[in-house]
Amino acid sequence: MIKTDLLEHVSGMITEKISRLQHDISDLQKDIAEDSKSSAGDKFETSREMAQQELLKLGTQLAEQQRLKNLVESQSAETSSTIKVGTLVQTNSGVFLVGIPIGKFLFQNTVVIGIGVGAPLGQLLLNKSENDRFTFNGQNFQIEKIS
């Protein structure tokens, strides 16, 4: 598995999420503008407040996706002897992309799990090297390859 291809794939996935969020925000803003032209009263105020809260939530999600995209694009293809943010880790029990918390996704017929460094497994992986072993949730892992 080539790390640069994987990072391009992840960047593309995040770009799609950003596009969907921007579209949802735009639609919601249009709905809010149309509601304000045609409604009045308590029901209108409640509806408008709920839409504003949804807009705030979407804005937060958009900012997080943009942060992740910047993080992915700042990663280099160079390899390291120890695991750090941006390292692709192949273990006997799965493949992990460390420091990029995007969850499970399929890449070249392989399930990859993007985990944050704040996650318990992410914390265990940091600074480990090839052939290191560790246990997580009662499961034994051996690091087979890092890139």
Image (cartoon, rainbow, N blue to C red):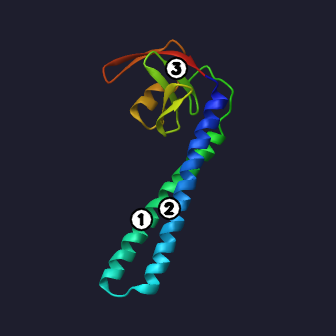
Three-letter code for the amino acid on which mark 1 is drawn: Glu
| Residue at the farthest top position | 131
Q: Earlier in the sequence, mark 1 or mark 3?
A: 1
Q: Residue at x 44, y 38 (%)?
A: 118
Residue 101 x, y percent position in the rendering: 48, 39
Q: Quadrant of the N terminus?
A: top right
Residue 88 x, y percent position in the rendering: 56, 26
The residue identified by callout 1 is 54
Residue 127 x, y percent position in the rendering: 53, 24
Crowding at dot 1, Cα within 10 Å, few <14 / some 14-19 / many 20+, comes out as: some
The residue identified by callout 2 is 24
Crowding at dot 3, Cα within 10 Å, few <14 / some 14-19 / many 20+, comes out as: many
Count the marks: how many?
A: 3
Three-letter code for the amino acid on which mark 2 is drawn: Asp
Res 87 quadrant in image = top right
Q: Is residue 43 left or right of residue 25?
A: left
- The correct choice, above or below, for 147 with respect to 33 in the image is above
Residue 133 x, y percent position in the rendering: 44, 14
The residue identified by callout 3 is 90
Q: Secondary structure at mark 3?
A: strand
Q: Distance from label 3 to label 2 (Cα)?
A: 36 Å
